Amino acid sequence: MVANLETGQKVSLQKDNEELSKLIIGLGWDQIKTKKKGLFAFLLETPIDCDASVFMLQDDKLHSKKDIVCFKRLCHYSNSVLHTGDNLTGAGDGDDEQIIISLDGIPESYNRGIFVVNIYRAQQRKQHFGMIHNAFIRIVDATTNIEMYRYNLTEDYTNMTAMIFGEIHREDNGWKFNAIGKGTYDLGIDEIAKRYI
């Protein structure tokens, strides 16, 4: 049975499952439908294009752009992190974007992976996370396809253009997940990345 997490909650991923070696990190969101009037109002609504990324950190720092896995760089050089591709609209049920993590393949020098989502061209399109609902991040055991944890973001993120959803971090007794849910005003991946340099 899936465990629902709250903001700031930290859980061990391998405490009861030492064999866990591969994760699917699913991220999802829905665009709130506006109440514009007129028969063709829905045609005027610009879809919100959210982009999920993961920053792979060494000693809690981002050392190189090659450690950012996103729609522009779908695979980490170590082959331990794989982004399955960009969803331009967030339409449909389930995960909008997925990142696959091979825990055993992450080089020892990396201790943290930060999962973020930003709105593409948010400023130009006048879009923000207050226009999005049902946002979540979920952790799935890729071997069994069993969802282990889910974190639903429920705060009001009006005017925020990026979101730090959560992170995995390495400790002596294995990998843990931290539900963060922090909105930011960063306008793109490069701006978010500066937080970890």
Image (cartoon, rainbow, N blue to C red):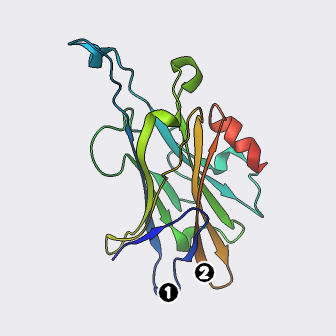
Within-10-Å neighbours for mark 2: few <14, some 14–19, many 20+: some
Residue 89: image location, x then y, percent: 37, 33
Q: Is residue 33 above or below residue 70?
A: above
Label 1 sits on a secondary structure element that is loop
Give the residue at mark 1.
Answer: 18
Q: In front here: 16 or 128?
A: 128
Residue 58: image location, x then y, percent: 74, 61
Q: Residue at x 53, y 21 (%)?
A: 126
Could you tell me which quadrant the N terminus lies in? bottom left
Q: Residue at x 35, y 51 (%)?
A: 95
Label 2 sits on a secondary structure element that is strand
Q: Are marks 1 and 2 in contact (CB under 8 Å)?
A: yes
Residue 139 in sight here: yes
Q: Is residue 1 above or below residue 39?
A: below
Q: In front here: 172 or 80?
A: 172
Give the residue at mark 2.
Answer: 174
Q: Give amino acid for label 1.
A: Glu
Residue 6: image location, x then y, percent: 53, 65
Q: Give amino acid for label 2.
A: Gly
Within-10-Å neighbours for mark 1: few <14, some 14–19, many 20+: few
Residue 144: image location, x then y, percent: 32, 75
